[in-house]
Amino acid sequence: MNPNLTKLGVAQTTLTLEEKNFLDQNGYLNLGQLLSDEQLELIRNRISFLLQQEGEAAGAELLDSPYIRHPKEEGADRLADLVNKGSEFDIFYTHPKVLAAMAHVLGQEFKLSSLNYRAAKPGKGLQKLHADWHEAVEVNDYKVCNSIWLLDDFSRANGATRVVPGTQLNGQLPQDALEDPWATHPDEVLIEAPAGSVFIFNSHTWHGGTNNSTDQYRRAIHSYFCRIDQPQQVDQKRYIQAATKARLPEAALEILGI
C-alpha cells in the first residue's frame, strides 16, 4: 500500500471484496452517505457564498485548462479549484473510501486532477453519453476516475446522472458506437440516491447528466483523479495557495501532486 494512502486511513480492507468486484464489473460504485447533515449544510453554505462572491467569473479556472473540453456549460453553474476555497472541501480528496476506490481503479500512484462544483439548472442539464477520456483504453489501463458527491437528493425528476454499466470493458467510445449518444440507452442505470451519498465512476464508463425537470438546482461536487503519469485538469502546483499548503498534511499534498 502506498504509504501516503496509509497515512490518510486507507487499508486493503477499506473497500470490501464485493465492492471491488462490483466496481470492476459495472464501472461505478455507490459508497453510501459519507457526508453528515451538518457537513452538507456547511458545504452548501460555502458554495452559496462562493457563487455570490465570484459572480460571472465563477468557474473561470476551467477556461485556463487545455484538458477540459467543455469548461463552461449553458445548462449548469460551475465552480472550480475548490482545493483553495475552504477547508470544508478537504474531505473530497482525502476520504479513505474514495481514495481506496481510486487506488483500485488507477493503481497506487494517482493524484487529484480537479475539484469542481456543478449544478444542473432547472429545465437543463442533459448531457450526451460520454467517457471522460479522448480515446478508448484497454481493460485495467485506466487513466482517470471520478467521484460525484451529491449535495441534493438525486432523482429522475431533477436530472440524476445516468451510467451504462460495464461499458468501461468494451474498448469503445459512445460517440463511435452509438447512433445517438443523446438518446436513452437500453442498459442505462439512473443514479438515484439521497444527499450526502458518494458515487465512484470509472471515467471510461459511459455516463451523462439527464434533464432537470424541477424548479430547483441539482448540486454536486466532482473530485476527479488521474493516474500519476497523466496531466491534471487543474495544475495544483500552479494554483496552490500558501494558506492551503500550510493547512494540509504532507500525505494530502502528495494526493494533490505537490
Image (spheres, grey):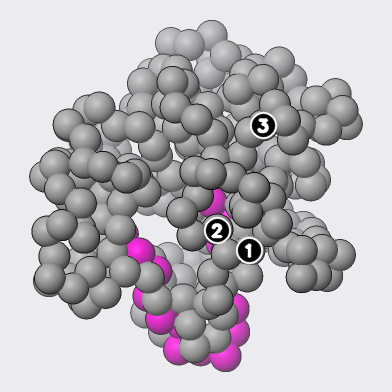
Against 160, is 28 above or below? Answer: above
Where in the figure is residue 35, as x and y percent of width and height?
60, 51
Label 2 environment density (alpha carbons within 10 Å; few <14, some 14–19, many ≥20)? some
- Amino acid type, mark 2: Pro
Q: In this rendering, would 6 be left or right of 181?
A: right
For the residue pair 30 and 109, the one nearer the viewer reads as 109
- Residue marked by disc 2: 71
In magenta, the rendered stretch is 207-223
Element marked by disc 3: helix
Is 50 above or below relative to 100?
below
Whether residues under marks 3 and 2 lie with C-beta atoms below 8 angstroms apart, the answer is no
Q: Type of residue at label 1? A: Arg
State the residue position of label 1. 78
Marks 1 and 2: CB-CB under 8 Å? Answer: yes
Q: Position of residue 21 (x, y in %)?
A: 21, 35
- Which numbered tag is attached to residue 236? 3
Q: CA distance from mark 1 to mark 3?
A: 18 Å
